Image (cartoon, rainbow, N blue to C red):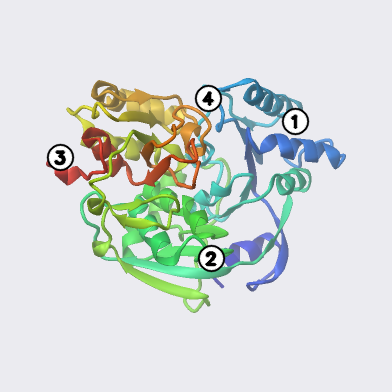
Amino acid sequence: MTIAEKILAEHCGRKEVAPGELVQVRVDFILANDITAPIAIREFRRTGAKRVFDPERVALVPDHFAPQKDIQAAQQCKLLREFSWQQELRYYFEVGRMGIEHALLPEEGLVLPGDVVIGADSHTCTYGALGAFATGVGSTDVAAAMATGECWFKVPESMKFIYYGSPRPWVGGKDFILHTIGDIGVDGALYRSMEFEGEAIRRLPMHARLTMCNMAIEAGAKTGIIAPDAVTEEYVKGRAKRPYRFYSSDPHARYAELREYDVSRIPLTVACPSLPSNTRAAQELTHIGIDQVVIGSCTNGRLEDLREAAQVLRGRKVNPHTRLIVIPATQRIYLQAMREGLLEVFIEAGGVVSTPTCGPCLGGHMGILAKGERALATTNRNFVGRMGHPESEIYLANPAVAAATAALGRIGVPEELGL
């Protein structure tokens, strides 16, 4: 079996499962946010359930419209807060102690290797970077799982993606996954498990693995997953709130498809409007002016991402025709970035630093685009109207390209700044 099949088999009490089978599995962890949790809470109450199955296995994170941007957002967050208190949930994360959910939960050691994790948010697939089977589901599925501790799945087929070689300067996990989505398309892995492996993956640090698995959904995948190894162990051993287990695919496991990539041939990559699959080399786009740069999100708001952006911007200024918005993904990242002087680099360059929030990624707040404006962001989606006006445009790139773009006022690469 593949790693995904092994995890599902273990969680439904069977020796093996096969693609296409419907299985009822035990869930290790459930999450929802201030947009999706209110629906789940209402449906949970409609079931007649009085208590969640385990108050230590459910996390509610107000991150999309928090700090609350308007009355409706305040009502949504109030519902989360009151339900969490009523249910005595251990993992309700209030403003000031929170972060963007898909950066926060791995950081807190709440999602672990070998887990089955469901979340009422499509980017729950992020946790596959730890060797978990993690996927986004609807709010009603979350409601049922909060009551029962179980969820049903159709066992997905698996695709294997092998990456070898050494990357060019500044090229990382974001470029790997953008290049891959550009190759297979936004439905190229529809309801499949994208299994990433190879020497280039084994050399990737955890933050880059999280970026890759985060965007598996942009290829239509059910989950993205990387077999845990020494890098995984180093990341989770001091964080884990409970025991975990490493799984790996059998040598002769069957895959629906196999693709290989020489990462030395992957350029700094940008996804152009209005699909993540519309990719081109950044150096082909240096004629495109940019009004706003956003560095952050559950895709690229981790400490290493901020370090990379600060390395490019240190001693430089944001172009006078461009806005720079930097959003550390969690309070812990924010604090460490402050200690390292990274936030000072961004502010001295002429950027603004926000408290952790999803904010502009979903067109929520903290950076909405006007008609005709263009943004380059380290986020994960560039659909029409995603960040504001339907006649605005969004380009996606890694933090180094984003920082260089902020300095140049147009899409650019660090080499243009002598780096």
Q: Position of residue 290 (x, y in %)?
A: 31, 37
Q: Position of residue 116 (x, y in %)?
A: 62, 54
Q: Which mark is residue 87?
A: 1
Q: Residue at x 78, y 44 (%)?
A: 147
Mark 3 or mark 4: which is in front?
A: 3
Type of residue at label 3?
Leu
Which of these two is toward me, 188 or 45? 188
Marks 3 & 4, CB-CB < 8 Å contact: no
Q: Residues within 10 Å of mark 2 (few under 14, many from 20)?
A: many
Classify the position of the C terminus by image quarter: top left
Classify the position of the N terminus by image quarter: bottom right
Mark 1 or mark 3: which is in front?
A: 3
Type of residue at label 4?
Arg
Q: Which mark is residue 97?
A: 4
Q: Residue at x 35, y 33 (%)?
A: 292
Q: Which mark is residue 200?
A: none
| Mark count | 4
